[in-house]
Amino acid sequence: MFRNKIIYAFLFVLTAFVVKSNDLLTKAEKAYDNRQYKNAIASYEQLIKEGYNSDKLFYNLGNAYYRNNELGRAIYNYELAKKINPNDEDVKNNLSIAYSKTIDKIETKENFFISAVKTNVLSSFSTTSWAWLSILLCAITFLFLFIFVSAPSIGLKRFSFFISVMAVIGFFIIYFLGYSAVKANQQNNFAVITAPQTKVFTEPTSVSVSKFGLHEGTRVRIIELNADWVLIKLENGNEGWLKLSEVGVF
């Protein structure tokens, strides 16, 4: 009897949560359609605070910020959406458009072509997708090895052996790319400037020397984080400290 009451209470809370989430989502979408972007932003942000996260939610929030002329926060939410679903074409297109409107144009020390290819390849799939591709190629290898061993004809043996060799080569390539993607996710944390304009300091304190300034939407690499400050590095090698409240970490 007591257990049934607990189950009913849990179902009631769950139902209430779902209903409230749907109401907020409907409210946000209606506000966006009516060009009330601040109201849409408030509803989407409330959904996120309540633990409702998805690539579509971040994408819609990014659109609302973009329409509200808050470029930095738009890019930040597009990046969050891309992190969840790297292959979403709408997210990639809007992110490209938003980045093209940023003020700061940072030249990279690394060869641009190599850097772009490496980034695009590693971000083509999630780390889970790389893992499944490795498993699939491994399964194909064993399947065609079995066919090679049991094949009745020389022609089929040659074909299955060739496919097995190709699958093994593909497995090692995919495994390497997947490992590189995991390593990149672990080591390369990034952030986007969300404040309209900010200063980069030599030390994590406002009384230190200001080295240079950055504008909203600029993407930076994170070197170190503490309670209130973040040490960042630009593509051109410049480093400095920013207030954590002025960036969105993803």
Image (cartoon, grey):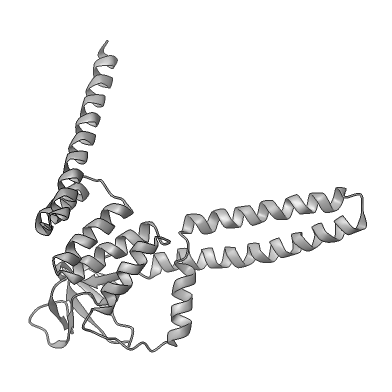
In terms of image quadrants, where is residue 197?
Answer: bottom left
| Figure check: 30 above or below 230 | above
Instruction: State left or right for residue 115 relative to residue 13.
Output: right
Query: Which quarter of the image is occupied by the N terminus?
Result: top left
| Figure check: 198 above or below 145 | below
Instruction: State left or right for residue 36 relative to residue 11.
Output: left
In terms of image quadrants, where is residue 71?
Answer: bottom left
Measured from the top left, where is residue 187 in percent x and y? Answer: 39, 69
Answer whether residue 222 is visible to the viewer in this image. no
Q: Residue furthest front?
A: 34
Q: Residue furthest top?
A: 1
Taking the spot 47% from the left edge, 59% from the top edge, the residue there is 127
Answer whether residue 62 is visible to the viewer in this image. yes
Measured from the top left, where is residue 7 in percent x and y? Answer: 28, 21
Measured from the top left, where is residue 191 in percent x and y? Answer: 27, 70
The residue nearer to you, when weighing 69 against 247, is: 69
Query: Which quarter of the image is occupied by the C terminus?
Result: bottom left
Q: Residue furthest right?
A: 153
Taking the spot 38% from the left edge, 89% from the top edge, the residue there is 109
Taking the spot 28% from the left edge, 15% from the top edge, the residue there is 4
In terms of image quadrants, where is residue 78?
Answer: bottom left
Instruction: State left or right for residue 157 relative to residue 60.
Output: right
